[in-house]
Image (spheres, rainbow, N blue to C red):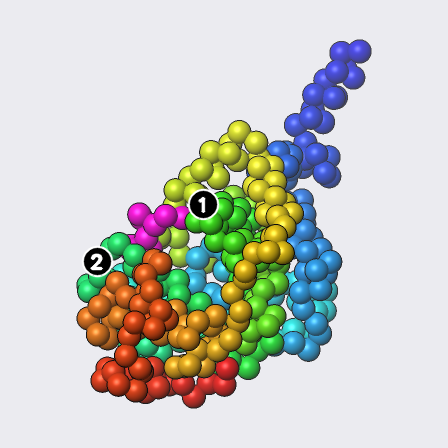
Amino acid sequence: MEESHGGDKARSRLCCICNQRRPALRRPKTLQQICRECFYVVFEEEIHRVIVDNKLFKSGERIAIGASGGKDSTVLAYVMSELNRRHNYGLDLFLLSVDEGITGYRDDSLETVKRNEVQYGLPLKVVSYKDLYGWTMDEIVKMIGLKNNCTFCGVFRRQALDRGAALLKVDKLATGHNADDIAETVLLNILRGDIARLSRCTSIITGEDGPIPRCKPFKYTYEKEIVMYAYFKKLDYFSTECIYSPNAYRGFAREFIKDLERIRPRAILDIIKSGEDFRIATSTKMPEQGTCQRCGYISSQKWCKACVLLEGLNRGLPKLGIGRTRGINGDRQKDDQQIGVKNLQSKACESLDF
């Protein structure tokens, strides 16, 4: 009996999947005690299943991977490269980075992306705010201060990624948004009462009616597991937070999600499931998508958000377009042709076909 009890105790100290090696970690998602080798297998296999089950890609497609140099995009680039070879997806993969012009942050992280380009053998394209919009984030923050700077950066980055993807002539853009990110976005959209975004923020593929569809292979992947994978694989990534984002509203939602995860690890997936199950009442008026009259980018208003924000910057009115003020799209401003300011039409992005 003593020998049997000792044997059971010894087995309990082994990986719960292979029962051969000692555990190296406790999986945040399942709380399983598993070895490093089994963690690699289940981590990669779960992402492969998400790709296959949701038909994210088709053989022969050109796919741009949004690459910031951070843990999420670095792991995504590595895993996508591995799975593409292992399972013969038949994809042409590219790295796409945005240089927001943040000294001491983005310039350093772009060096990481350039090393990833060599390490993974993936061609890299970099587009910059300065080239597209005539402004860097350093210049924007100098004008508007630290409040609301994330609004400018988020709007500009989204459009910059689409414009970069168009230059690469890709079929889809894959981003490193993980389960934590999506759960945070569900909460933020509820808190903001943003019905339009709430109805699509949990979709694994978005923008199918826009210029470049986007997909999220990490939709069900926990941030902690991405960090563990990068650590055990010794991947080369940049870990410094943006110097302009410590007070971002999203940060408070992130802390709340972390607290929930500590109490109940499945909370992240439960929030995503709740977001998926929301039904928008048929009587709710949803925005109708059209194109920006100024730059041709997708927009539900006369001008897209990027053009409105740029107009404010160029006229020395940085609060124009922030929050729920009417501004240009409320027809309070003069016609575009009557405004003698720096215009998007002088930028290289105008030559792209949207």
**Is 161 above or below relative to 233?**
below
Crowding at mark 2 (Cα within 10 Å: few <14, some 14-19, many 20+): few
Residue furthest front as drawn: 283
Task: Tell me what residue is drawn at x 19 percent, y 65 percent.
Answer: 143
**Is 192 above or below relative to 161?**
above
Q: Is the magenta stretch mostly helix, strand or loop?
A: loop
Q: Does the magenta stretch include residue 243?
A: yes
Numbered disc 2: secondary structure: loop
Residue range corresponding to the magenta coloring: 242-250
Residue located beneath label 2 in the image: 145
Residue furthest top as drawn: 1
Is residue 161 visible in the rendered image? The answer is no
Mark before the other along the chain sequence, 1 or 2: 2
Between 30 and 202, the one lying in front of the other is 202
Q: Position of residue 14 (x, y in %)?
A: 68, 31
- The residue type indicated by label 2 comes to Gly
Give the image quarter of residue 340.
bottom left
CA–CA distance in space, label 1 to label 2: 25 Å
Residue located beneath label 1 in the image: 191
Task: Tell me what residue is drawn at x 35 percent, y 58 percent.
Answer: 324
Q: Where is residue 322 in the image (x, y as percent from the top left)?
A: 32, 61
Task: Tell me what residue is drawn at x 44 percent, y 67 percent.
Answer: 158
Q: Is residue 215 magenta?
A: no
Looking at the image, residue 293 sits to the left or right of residue 172; the answer is left
Say which mark, if any, is on residue 33: none
Q: Position of residue 162 (x, y in %)?
A: 48, 74
